[in-house]
Amino acid sequence: MNINYLRIFKTVCDEGGVTKASKKLYIAQPSVSLAIKELEKNYEVKLFDRISRKLILTAKGQQLYDYVTDILPLIDEIDEKLREGDQVGGRLRIGSSVTFGNYYLFDIIQALKKEYPDLEFQLTIDSSYAIEELVANNDVDLGVIEGHSHIDNINSRVIMEDDLVFVKSRDFPKGIGSYDDLNGCEVLLRNLGSAHREIFDGLMKAHDINPKIVLESISTSALIEGCIKGLGVAFLPHKFIVGHLEHGLEAIAALATVKRNYFLITHQNKYVSNNMEIFIRELEKIK
């Protein structure tokens, strides 16, 4: 089995054709075509149907792609781990949800850079769903997300929790004494696809409430600013609003505080490297 042929095959699948794969890999198109032919010859199967100049995976091709997607990251880790020895250094790829990234991640990185100057970081901050996809595809080494993972090949465990609260400006004209008062009320929300938003939508569904969404944003700062200006009610982490209470923001005591968990996630086949271990240890110090 030629590992390079398998890498070429996967790239052809991911890129949707030989031409794009050759550009991605910086090799000639005939070399890409040869790799596919050699794989088909070796396994005595047809991997692609060629329809209207498009390559469509056959059932056997899809089966090989599924295996290759799991195998190649493990091969890369073998090479990385054997070269790594017991040293801490090189690159660590970390994915983080927006809230965790904004509030906690940079402090962790700062502490680790002081202790391990040879360790390099590649950070991605995005929605929890996007980080799950990156972990599942081995595009990051580990991730921190809000809420449970929705992907089968991911291992997860709780690392910490925080509180989500409903807040409004003291000058907001509408009084909020119960969930019913949110019916038709202006609200400021995180974007669809965030675990934060999923919790809010679940609460509204449970209470049969239909609020009026006036702002959706990936930026917690934008939600806080809009709330201070009286645009509507927001649903935010308590730790984020503490510094803004003196600016006219207040928690709505009549609505319950919601506990929210943060999860450390890794691919189920991922070998935990020394770099990952020191990050996890630093992560576990957070209260």
Image (cartoon, rainbow, N blue to C red):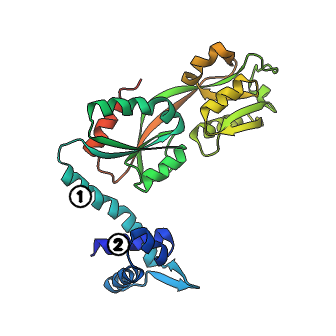
Q: Residue furthest top?
A: 246
Residue 167: image quadrant is top right
Question: Quick check: marks 1 and 2 in contact, CB under 8 Å?
Answer: no
Q: Position of residue 101 (x, y in %)?
A: 48, 35
Whichever of callouts 1 and 2 sits on the residue coming sooner in the sequence is 2
Quadrant in which the N terminus is drawn: bottom left
Asked if residue 34 lies left or right of residue 191, the reply is left
Residue at 53% of width from left, 34% of height from top? 99
Residue 36: image quadrant is bottom left
State whether residue 84 is above or below residue 200: below
State whether residue 60 is above or below residue 252: below
Residue at 70% of width from left, 26% of height from top? 227
State whether residue 2 is above or below residue 281: below
Spatial CA distance of label 1 from label 2 is 16 Å
Q: Nearer the viewer, residue 165 or 232?
A: 232
Q: Secondary structure at mark 1?
A: helix
Mark 2 burial class by Cα count in 10 Å: few <14, some 14-19, many 20+: many
Residue 115 in view, yes or no = yes
Q: Nearer the viewer, residue 78 or 183?
A: 78
Q: Amino acid at mark 2?
A: Leu
Asked if residue 205 lies left or right of residue 72, the reply is right
Residue at 76% of width from left, 36% of height from top? 214
Q: Which residue is mark 1?
A: 79
Q: Secondary structure at mark 2?
A: helix
Residue at 38% of width from left, 73% of height from top? 8
Q: Position of residue 110 (x, y in %)?
A: 37, 31
Q: How many marks?
A: 2
Q: Which residue is mark 2?
A: 6
